[in-house]
Image (cartoon, rainbow, N blue to C red):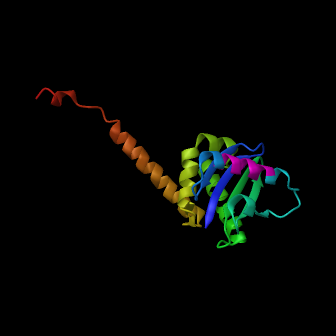
Amino acid sequence: MIKGVILMNDKGKPRLAKFYDYHPTEKQQELIRRLYGVLSSRAENVSNFVKVDSLFGPDARLVYKTYATLHILFIFDSSENELAMLDLMQVFVETMDKCFSNVRELDIVFNFNKVHAILDEIILGGEVLETSSSEVVKAVEEIYKMERAANSIMAVPSITSWQGR
């Protein structure tokens, strides 16, 4: 099971944090700080796979990848394959690239709802739903089409002539 997905910049500021196990807000913030401490203390020539038993309990693992100034972290247990998680991370990044045309940190900050929608199409409740970035893009586009249609229905002006009859 996937325990969490975190996107943070190279200064440790979280841009997206989604935990699939319940943790109070204070605990989430502490986990993010400690994960940043783990990442910032690692050399560049070491593996992207880390055991994080002390933070998330027995058999917890972390896989991370750095894109420019953005760290993407997936935390999961032993039921998931490390290489599959790395591939799923790539699907997530490719999907964001397709939706935002070469995604940057500011895209994530200003379009957090869309980033959450993308993540929810890929992972739900800690389980992988979709591994095809093109299918995820279609689903997210469909969600936003329905949102725009709903907003346009609500924007229809009222007809005052009906009130007089």
Q: Is residue 4 a member of the stretch shown in magenta? A: no
Give the quadrant of residue 120: bottom right
Residue 62, x across and y down, in percent: 73, 62
**Location of residue 105 with respect to 54 vertically, above or below:** above
Q: Identify the residue shown where x is 74% and y is 60%.
A: 54
**Location of residue 67 with respect to 110 vertically, above or below:** below
Residue 89, x across and y down, in percent: 67, 61
Q: Identify the residue shown where x is 75% and y is 44%.
A: 12
Residue 103, x across and y down, in percent: 67, 48
- Direction from residue 124 to residue 31 in the image, left or right: right
Locate the C terminus and report the quarter of the image it occupies.
top left
* Residue 12 shows up from this direction: yes
Give the quadrant of residue 59: bottom right
* Residue 101 shows up from this direction: no
Residue 159, x across and y down, in percent: 23, 31
Give the quadrant of residue 90: bottom right
**Magenta-tinted stretch:** 28-37
**Total labels drawn:** 0
